[in-house]
Image: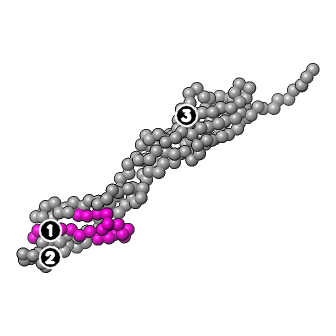
């Protein structure tokens, strides 16, 4: 009548017997605990499946003739932790725009995150960290100017952008953005 142990068998992924074990917590009720023998990593494998089978203590002093239960399938989903920070695809982004106009999008910055879950792998927002620049960035990384640019006033604008994943991890390294303002051609007389 008592449960003496559990056997873990490989599942479809083949990971069961290597990574998991089951131990008996209460022989009379058959309560047990399934645990991993080694750390699990969501980025390596998100889910594990295997079968488990209980066996009783058998008859006689040596426990011979033990009986086994039907096999049950166990599915383990590995929860992600926010272990990775966003990384920009490029360290430097460059663009040129003509002066005197507003643009909805001058250049797009992009960061990626290696975490496995949508919560931690998605970039939730970008932020321009250089103060007092006439530019804004949206949550998709699109940079636009917030006022018309004047090449005579400032020919090149250089500023830094960072990214945050949805777990609030900041980019490991910020990206530099360089925007060159091209003068517009104006008809007119030269000389006297």
The quadrant the N terminus occupies is: bottom left
Q: Are marks 3 and 1 in contact (CB under 8 Å)?
A: no
Mark nearer the N terminus (2 vs 3): 2
- 161 left or right of 45 in image: right
The picture places residue 159, in percent across and down from the top left corner, at: 60, 33
Q: Quadrant of residue 93?
A: top right
Identify the residue at horizontal 14%, vertical 76% (top origin).
Answer: 66
The picture places residue 104, in percent across and down from the top left corner, at: 64, 37
Residue 50, can we see it? no
Q: Nearer the viewer, residue 102 or 149?
A: 149
Identify the residue at horizontal 49%, vertical 42% (top origin).
Answer: 172
Q: Are marks 2 and 3 in contact (CB under 8 Å)?
A: no
Q: Is residue 160 magenta?
A: no
The picture places residue 26, in percent across and down from the top left corner, at: 13, 61
Mark nearer the N terminus (3 vs 1): 1
Residue segment shown in magenta: 1-22
In the picture of the structure, the residue carrying the numbered disc 1 is 4
Q: Residue furthest right?
A: 192
Residue 128's tag is 3
Q: Nearer the viewer, residue 28 or 14?
A: 14
Q: Secondary structure at mark 2?
A: loop
Identify the residue at horizontal 14%, vertical 71% (top origin).
Answer: 56
Density class for disc 3 (Cα within 10 Å; few <14, some 14-19, many ≥20) is many
Density class for disc 2 (Cα within 10 Å; few <14, some 14-19, many ≥20) is few
Residue 66's tag is 2
How far apart are the two marked residues, 3 and 1, measured between alpha carbons?
Answer: 62 Å
Q: Secondary structure at mark 1?
A: strand
Q: Are marks 1 and 2 in contact (CB under 8 Å)?
A: yes
Residue 3, can we see it? yes
How far apart are the two marked residues, 1 and 2, measured between alpha carbons?
Answer: 9 Å
Q: Is residue 2 magenta?
A: yes
């Amino acid at each position: 009548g008592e449960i003496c142990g559990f056997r873990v068998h490989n599942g479809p992924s083949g990971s069961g017997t290597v990574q998991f074990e089951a131990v008996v917590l209460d022989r009379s009720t058959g309560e047990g605990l399934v645990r991993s023998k080694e750390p699990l990593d969501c980025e390596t494998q998100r889910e594990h499946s295997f079968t488990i089978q209980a066996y009783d203590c058998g008859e006689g002093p040596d426990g011979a003739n033990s009986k086994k239960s039907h096999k049950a399938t166990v599915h383990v989903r590995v929860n992600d932790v926010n272990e990775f920070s966003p990384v920009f695809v490029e360290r430097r982004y460059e663009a040129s725009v003509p002066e005197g106009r507003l643009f909805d999008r001058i250049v797009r910055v992009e960061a990626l995150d290696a975490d496995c879950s949508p919560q931690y792998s998605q970039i939730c927002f970008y932020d321009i960290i250089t103060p007092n620049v006439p530019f804004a960035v949206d949550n998709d990384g699109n940079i636009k100017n917030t006022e018309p640019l004047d090449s005579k006033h400032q020919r090149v604008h250089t500023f830094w952008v960072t990214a945050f994943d949805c777990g609030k991890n900041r980019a490991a390294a910020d990206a530099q953005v360089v925007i060159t303002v091209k003068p517009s051609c104006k008809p007119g007389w030269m000389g006297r």
